[in-house]
Amino acid sequence: MDRRNFLKKGSMGGLMGLAGARDVYRIVQQAPEPIRLPPADEVVRCAIIGFGQWGRQMAETVEDLPEVQLSAICDTYAPMLRRAERAHPDATRHTEYGEVLGSPDIDAVLIATPTHLHKQVVLDALAAGKHVYCEAPIAHTVAEAREIGHAADAASDQIFQVGLHLRTEPQYRSVFQFIRSGAIGDSVMSRTQWHRKQSWRQASPNGQRARDLNWRLDADLSLGLVGEIGLQQLDVASWLMGAYPTSVTGFGSTLLWNDGRDVPDTVQAVFGFPGGRNLMFDASLASSFDSDYETFFGTNSTIMLRDQKAWMFKEVDAPMLGWEVYARRDKFYKETGVALVANATKLDSLGLDPTADDPNLKSPLWHGLKSFSDNFFFGPYPAIADQNLGFAMTVLADAAKRAIASGQRVELTETDYQL
Amino acid sequence: MATRFEVVVMGRNEAYARAAGEEALAEIRRVEGQLSWFDPASLLSRINRDAASGPVVVHAPVFGLLQRIKQLHGVTDGAFDPTIIPDEDGLPETGRTGAGMAGMVLDIENRTISFTRSDIALNLGGIGKGYAIDEAATILREAGVENALIQGGTSTAYALGRDDDRPWRIALSHPSPDRAGQQVAWVELENAALSISGIYGRGRRLADGEWVGHVIDPRTGNAVRDTELAAVVVDSDRGALRALDPRAKQSTDSAAAQSERSYPSTDSDALSTALLVLGSHSAAPNAFPDCRTLCFSKDKVTDQFGPWHIGALAARKEENGP
């Protein structure tokens, strides 16, 4: 641990605190993009706990990170372990996660179980001395999120990272700096959406297994569309706005999937941020129109983030920035968006066309896991998505769930977000 | 890929059938994402970009597919060959004069692929669809689905179980664009895959009225002319093709994992292209062990092996198929 503690850093990013209107203009000092190579011959030996759809995605992503070794896969359901064997024959397979926690050959665990099962796995993994990457939301209740947060605080020599991975995605980081430099003018409002036409149900031949699989449709266990899907977008909005919401109003209905579920298939929510700026959120499992993206409206321009790409739409009276004359433009019906390209100069220096699709594009999850492995080799330092952020986002998701269920406006104070 | 996939799931519980179908389609999207020629960030694009400069590590399932491609190339005497020499624009369909499988090297120990030449590329358009369908069928089986039909691009279909009280029945349309929609044959499938390949599509008509299709014989570089349509049926449980499965040998203690899985659609997809090129079953008897094959040219059956029904399929009263 000595080498890692030697490199321990104070804080890398995280929330910038409750920002007033003027603060939005400030260019915020950001940690530089890490240019790091792991020590030769050293790898993080990981176990994935929970090999459902997301666990599989994680395992595939891990195989794209040479410095991370997928050593073990845990799942309680035999067919999932057979799937694991086919896809990742080199990883050992376990029905009891205790086996990997007891193994000295595992450095870290990546937790992809259903949300309501996270807590015990996190507590056991931290107690066993493992580094932990836990999917978001970290828990289905504020109380359990707090327990997890305190356990992570107590294990300060171990990494605890939450799967809120857009803060480590280069395109989002670049837009963050762009907005914080004042390029969109005064922030006006923001809007995010997530639209799919799908049941959100999973099928299994085994009745108990089917109930276990469909925890997302159970109001007691699920934070619903806001918590299980929208949390990533709400995290980005909080990050860009420099504050957590102070209120939530929400609506939810089941409009298509009347199959006995008690979690709405279509929701809208308005999140109030300091300074009278609101975020409009909507998500639906009943319509796929226009898919998912985030839009941040400013007095000078509006930025749209979509599919790990970003565009700026300028107001006619906005000042010239200069470079946009040369930038690629894309038409969106009658609007013209100026493409914002992360690492444009880097791509240019590599002889790659910055406006073409990036052949080295990696998913947000890849960047999240990359920052986790960087932390293993060069830390531990508090993760960008640490227990404080994980806790705060659970508080927000829980408030949204209550607002939607009751039809009442839920107020949140700064202390509510504090672990 | 601009291919439309469809899944029909039979079952009494609609919510359950829908959920299983959604998972199968999600699996197809996942596989397409890996094997897409057009997405520069796909695994296939990475192989095509980097494999000439050094070994590229690939996930175990995709490595299994690459091994199978080598074997299918071998048993078809080179009539199935997904290695190509892309043209100046990097397009897959032209200049396809058989880059040769010898240029593609697989390292089983390290699960890597490398190219010995810098001008070749791999285009999985002739097998990826079938592979995606096989992966989706595995998902359906694991979800407990017993009867379903999956089809991609109306050229490869996999029939899981039965269509109610009898095997799934699928009709083959006349390959010529002039007679589109006219049924020429039909076939019954139960736990079996069907693929069809035709020379029409992106082809052109010569001055004398002859149609030159888009399918090129990888061994000669000439356009395929003689056979207009080739169809291959591969049954899931046929021993000959199961023995072909490299994963069956690779895996040691995984009888259970393997028994849930076979690759009929992957094989039929590749073999139908090979049959179109070879022209008849007798030309390469080793290529189609235990398969049902059918070749059509100049409006008549020119080669047939196994049970096929020639002529149009009478419509069933209840609508069941896709």
Image (tube, coloured by chain):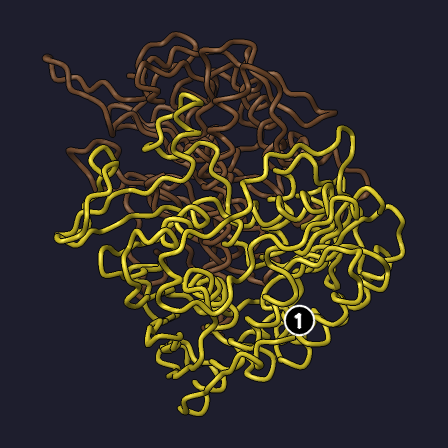
> Seen from this angle, which residue lies furthest left?
B207
Q: Position of residue A127 (x, y in %)?
A: 85, 64
Q: Is residue B269 above or below residue B152?
A: above
- Give the structural element (helix, strand or loop) at label 1: helix
Position of B109 relative to A272 (above/below): above
> Is there any visible trace of residue A138 in the rendered image?
yes
**A244, B222: nearer the viewer:** A244
Residue lying at 61% horizontally and 42% vertically, measured from the top left: B262
Q: Quadrant of the C terminus of chain B?
A: bottom left
The front one of B91 and A343 is A343
The x and y percentages for residue B137 are: 54, 51
Task: Judge left or right: residue A363 versus residue A177.
Answer: right
Is residue A267 among what the camera can see? no
Where, by quadrant of the figure, is residue A302 drawn? bottom left
- Judging depth in this view, the residue of B103 and B88 nearest the camera is B88
Provide residue A101's location: percent of width, then percent of height. Answer: 84, 57
> Looking at the rendering, which quadrant does residue A268 occupy?
bottom left
Provide residue A194's location: percent of width, then percent of height: 38, 64
Three-letter code for the amino acid on which mark 1 is drawn: Arg
Looking at the image, which residue is at 14% across and 14% down? B206
The chain drawn yellow is chain what?
A
Is residue B110 or residue B73 the one in the foreground?
Answer: B110
Residue marked by disc 1: A209
Chain of the residue under the numbered disc 1 shown in the image: A
